Amino acid sequence: MNRAQSWEGSELAPDIAQAKDLADRTLTGDRRAIARSISLVEDGDPLAGEVIRLLFPHTGRAIRVGITGPPGVGKSSLISGLIKAVRAEGRSVGVVSVDPSSPFTKGALLGDRIRLTEHFLDTGVFIRSMGSRGHLGGLAETTMEAVMVLDAAGKDVVFVETVGVGQSEIEVIGISDVIILVLMPGSGDSIQALKAGVMEIPDIIVVNKKDHPQAEQMCDEIGAMLCLSAAHKEWMPPILSTQAQLDEGVTELWLAVEDYVARQRASGELERRRARQLEQEVFALALQQMERHLRREAGSNLVLADILAQVARREVDPLTAQERILTEVFGVSPVD
Ligand SMILES: Nc1nc2c(ncn2[C@@H]2O[C@H](COP(=O)(O)OP(=O)(O)OP(=O)(O)O)[C@@H](O)[C@H]2O)c(=O)[nH]1
Ligand SMILES: [Mg+2]
């Protein structure tokens, strides 16, 4: 029984009614409603869950483009150019720009303000920056939900910008239909990204700042690395060079994105990728819940407490304990 049904009388509970009103307005593309929905998500407000529940059936339309790469390579500048390309096709745009290092980004980052400023008055564009505060589920969760809000609100294309060298790109993988890795010549971070085995991640690689003298060399190096690391893969990411400040190469980049998504859609891989991502999300949430369950039981379940005490006395090893917890406490058999 959901909460709406459990509310006595014919009227919905006030918070449910509020969530419904907000979701309805978000679905019409109302800017203030979108902003409010994302704020709820960001704050981990209990109402957010209800809003997302209502919005979820309306998601799955937007193309989600993840843009990742080391700090300062030109991700925001590229997004600004890409927005122009998408708007020229008459399509609407959402941008979620994630800065894991900053807890203070509500509103917009100063840099992005400057970079994306020309789009702020365009009602077909919604831009939002997010920091790392709030939410138990973490930034990946918050970002995913923010993207869902924009998707449900009817944005045709949603760009997600994340800064990263190495690990933090992983976050964008679970929420993108296509991933663009941006690197730049002559930067230690970019070289480090190459070394860190990040090449497995992107569907498209961009070497931005092609006005830099070492740009061509960088493209060659990446090409060589790709040949080594991605030879076995079905898809060899194209390497494009751009000069984001002048919007050079950006139209070509947008065409590459559209081409990639069209291929994925035609082969059925887009649907499979989305299904895998959602499965991942469901499992992550279920695991969180199971962990909470286990910790709660540890305080009250006598069998579990006894097993833990035996481990503490070193009479039972952790592996055996774990097997016994599954069978004796939860009544399920361990899986190899
Ligand atoms: N020379 C040159 N500079 C560029 C180019 N593209 C962007 N820049 C500059 O590089 C700097 C960083 O650009 P951003 O677009 O903010 O880069 P970013 O990757 O979004 O940066 P963070 O979000 O801070 O990681 C800015 O000063 C840009 O003006 C380019 O093609 N050539
Ligand atoms: Mg940026």
Image (spheres, grey):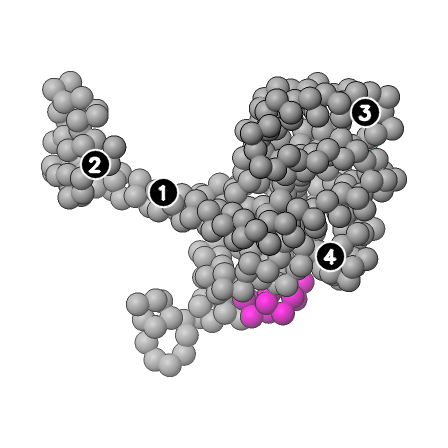
Magenta run includes residue 30: yes
| Residue at the disc numbered 2 | 334
Q: Nearer the viewer, mark 3 or mark 1?
A: 3
Segment tinted magenta in the rendering? 22-31
- Residue 215: which disc? 3
The CB of the residue at mark 4 lies under 8 Å from ligand 2: no
Q: What element carries label 1?
A: helix
Q: Is mark 3 on a helix, strand or loop?
A: helix
Dot 4 or dot 3, earlier in sequence: 4
Verify CB contact (< 8 Å) between mark 1 and mark 2. Answer: no
Residue 74, how many percent across, how many down? 76, 35
> Which residue type does callout 4 highlight?
Val
**Does the image show residue 127?**
yes
Q: In this view, does 53 lie to the left or right of 131?
A: left
Pointer 2: residues within 10 angstroms few (<14), some, or many (20+)?
few
Residue 262, how many percent across, how many down? 65, 52
Q: What secondary structure do most residues of the magenta stretch adopt? A: helix
Dot 3 or dot 1, earlier in sequence: 3
> Which residue type does callout 1 highlight?
Gln
* Residue at x 36%, y 42% (from the top left corner): 288
Residue 84, how many percent across, how many down? 80, 52
Q: In this view, does 123 lie above or below 102?
A: below
* Picture quarter with the N terminus: bottom left
Q: Which of marks 1 and 2 is in front?
A: 2
Q: How many numbered dots are placed on residues in this image?
A: 4
* Residue at x 44%, y 68% (from the top left corner): 16
Q: Distance between the residues labelled 3 and 1?
A: 44 Å
Q: Nearer the viewer, mark 4 or mark 3?
A: 3
Q: How far apart are marks 3 and 2 (CA)?
A: 53 Å
Report the front residue among 312 and 261. 261
